[in-house]
Amino acid sequence: MALPAYRHLLRSITLAFRDDTRLLTSALSTARSNFESSRILPPADAASKVAHAEEVAKVLKRNIVQGRRSEAKEGGERFRPSLAGTLAS
């Protein structure tokens, strides 16, 4: 029950932050430490943690938009959004 939720969360993190190495590394290590710290829990608490992980994975897949800097024609910076999460749903 927890392993599929963990894998789903890792896939969602990788998809949402694939172009931002620093944020990707941080999110993956946070997910791992949260799962590691919840290893020994009563079944009721474990079920709520797994449900929370699934909800986080859904939010990451559907609601995160990463922006990228692109070349501006006349000075200033422009940002181009990457809608990766909407393509993966």
Image (cartoon, rainbow, N blue to C red):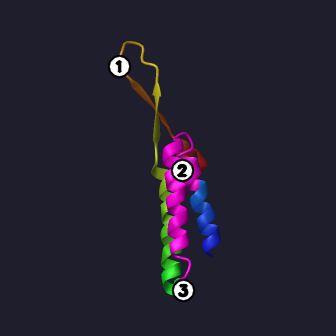
Q: Residue 21: x and y, percent?
A: 54, 43
Amino acid at pointer 2: Thr
Amino acid at pointer 3: Pro
Q: Nearer the viewer, mark 3 or mark 2?
A: 2
User: Is 83 rendered above or below residue 25?
Assistant: above
Query: Dot 1 corresponds to which residue?
Result: 76
Magenta span main SS: helix
Residues in magenta, as a range: 12-40
User: Is 33 rendered above or below residue 87?
Assistant: below
Q: Residue 46: x and y, percent?
A: 52, 80
Query: Dot 2 corresponds to which residue?
Result: 25
Mark 3 vs 2: CB contact within 8 A: no
Secondary structure at numbered mark 2: helix
Q: Residue at x 48, y 77 (%)?
A: 48
Circle on res. 49: none
Secondary structure at numbered mark 3: helix
User: Is 41 rendered above or below residue 31?
Assistant: below
Which sits in the foreground, 22 or 2?
22
Q: Residue at x 38, y 23 (%)?
A: 77
Amino acid at pointer 1: Gly
Q: Residue at x 47, y 40 (%)?
A: 66
Q: Earlier in the sequence, mark 3 or mark 2?
A: 2
User: Is 22 rendered above or below residue 56?
Assistant: above
Q: Residue 1: x and y, percent?
A: 63, 76
Which sits in the foreground, 42 or 22?
22
Circle on res. 43: 3
Label 1 CA crowd tier, 10 Å (few <14, some 14–19, many 20+): few
Q: Earlier in the sequence, mark 3 or mark 1?
A: 3
Spatial CA distance of label 3 from label 2 is 29 Å
Spatial CA distance of label 2 from label 1 is 30 Å
